[in-house]
Amino acid sequence: MANIVTTLRNMFRIEELRQRIGFTLIALLAVRVGSFITIPGVDVTLLAQTNGSDNGTIFGLYDMFVGGAFSNAAIFALGIMPYISASIILQIAGVVLPELQKLQREGEDGRRKINQYTRMLTVPIAAMQAWGVSIKIAQTTVGAGGASVVPDAGFFWTMATILILTAGTVGLMWIGEQITDRGLGNGISLIIFIGIIARFPTAITQEITLIQAGSRNPVIDLVLVALLLGVIASVILITQGARRIPVQYAKRVVGRKVYGGTTQYIPLRVNTAGVMPIIFAQSILFVPATIASFFPNSTLWQDVAKVFSDRSVIYALFYGVIIVFFTYFYTAIAFNPKEVADNMKRNGGFIPGVRPGSPTSEYIENILTRITLPGAIFLALIAIMPTFAMNILKVPPVFASFFGGTSLLIIVGVALDTLQQIESFLLMRHYDGFMKTGKIRGRAGAMS
C-alpha cells in the first residue's frame, strides 16, 4: 500500500505526466457534459419518464457504451460506436481484400492510411445510425395519451438531428485522438470506459438504499464486494495470460556487424479476441427483446422476449455457446499464424524443433487453438456472471453488470492499458512503478 501511495505521489512530480493526466481528465469531463446536452426539439420532461424502457434490448446495450447519452437523447447519443464499427469492418475486410492486407504490412505508413479510411467510413455509418436514432426518438411516446417526446418531428428536425448526432460522433472521435496524442492512454477506449464507469455511483447508491431499507444485510454486501474483487482478479489474470513461444534468430554477418543470434518470444494470449465475442453475442441475443419492443401487443414476441431475457437460464446457455463460437471466429480474424510464420522465415527466425514455413504455421495454429478453449470458456462464464448475480444473489441490474460481461472486461482492459503507460513514464524517469517488477501489461503490451 505504501508503494502505491509513493507511486501516486511520483506521478505528479513528473511535469509531462501531470499535464497529460490533467488534459485527459478535462477531455473526459467534456465527454460527460455532452452526454447530458439534449438534442434541440426534444421535450426533456417527457423524456425523463421513459428512462429504463430500453433495458434488456439492443438499445440498452448501446446506451451502456455511450454512458446514458442515448437514453438522454443527447448530442453524443451515438457515442464513439460508429468509429468502432468502422474499425471492425476494415479489420474484417483486411482478411479478404488484398489492398488492405498490403497496407497492414506497410507498418506505420499503412496504419496511418487505414486510420484515415476508418475516419472517412465513420461519417456515413454515423449518419445512418443517426437517422435510425432520430426515428426511434420521434416514435417514443409517454402516458396513455401517447404524447411524443418530440412535439414537432418534421423533416427539418430529422435533418438537424442527423447532422447534430453525426457531428457529435466526429467530435468524440477528435477528442479521442487528442487524448491519445496529448493525454494518457488510448482515447477511444477511455471514452467508452468513462461511459461505463459513470454508472457505478448509481449502482452504489442502489445498494446503500437497500441496506437502509433493511432489504440487504451489510454482511451480504461485504461478501458481494469480496466476490467482485475475486472476479476482477481472475479477469486480470486471463487478460494478461499468454503462452510464450520461443523464436531463435540465426546469426548474420553484414559488413562488420553481426545481426541475430538472439532468442525472442511470440506471446499468444489466452484471450486474443478480447471483449468482441461478448459484444457480438449480446447483439444477437438482444434481437428478440428489441423486436418485441416494436410489437408490444404481440403475445408471441412477448413470450419469445421472456425466454431470451437476461434472467433466463436458456439465455445463459445460448449466450455461453455463442461466445465460445465467436471467440474462435474473432481469434481467427485477429491473429494469422501463416503471416507470422512467413515473417519469421523472411527474417531468419525459427522455432526450435520446428521447420520453417507451413510446419511453423501449423504448430502456432495448434497451440492457439488449444489455449483459446479455456479463454473462450472463461469469457462465457464471465459473461453470464451478471445473470447469476441477479437471479441467485438478487443484485440490482446496474450493480450486477459490474460482476462480469462487457462492462468488466472493458474496464479492466482499459485500466491495464493506462497503468502500463503510466508505468512507462515512471520507469523512464527512474521511479518505481505500481509493481516493483515493472511488468504491468495492458492488452497491447501483452502482444508486443
Image (cartoon, helix red, strand yellow):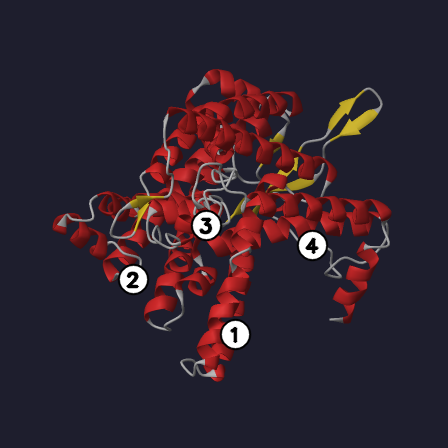
> Which dot marks residue 226?
1
In depth, the one of 274 and 203 nearer the eye is 203
SS state under label 3: helix
Quarter of the view holding residue 128: top left
Image spot of residue 213 (x, y percent): 43, 81
**Which residue position holds label 2?**
311
Viewer-nearest of discs 3 and 2: 3
Callout 1, which amino acid?
A: Ala
In depth, the one of 375 and 295 nearer the eye is 295
Callout 3, which amino acid?
A: Met
**Which residue position holds label 4?**
439
| Measured Cα–Cα span from mark 3 to mark 2 | 18 Å
**Which residue position holds label 3?**
64
Viewer-nearest of discs 2 and 1: 2
Q: Of label 2 and label 1, which has the lower sequence position?
A: 1
From the viewer's perspective, is 428 left or right of 149?
A: right
Callout 2, which amino acid?
A: Arg
Q: Of label 1 and label 3, which has the lower sequence position?
A: 3
Callout 4, which amino acid?
A: Lys
In depth, the one of 245 and 227 nearer the eye is 227
Q: Of label 2 and label 4, which has the lower sequence position?
A: 2
Image spot of residue 443 (x, y percent): 58, 46
| Measured Cα–Cα span from mark 1 to mark 4 | 25 Å
Q: Are marks 4 and 3 in contact (CB under 8 Å)?
A: no
Q: Are marks 2 and 1 in contact (CB under 8 Å)?
A: no
SS state under label 4: loop
SS state under label 2: loop
Q: Are marks 3 and 2 in contact (CB under 8 Å)?
A: no
Q: Of label 1 and label 4, which has the lower sequence position?
A: 1
| Measured Cα–Cα span from mark 4 to mark 3 | 31 Å
Residue that sits furthest to the top in the current view: 99
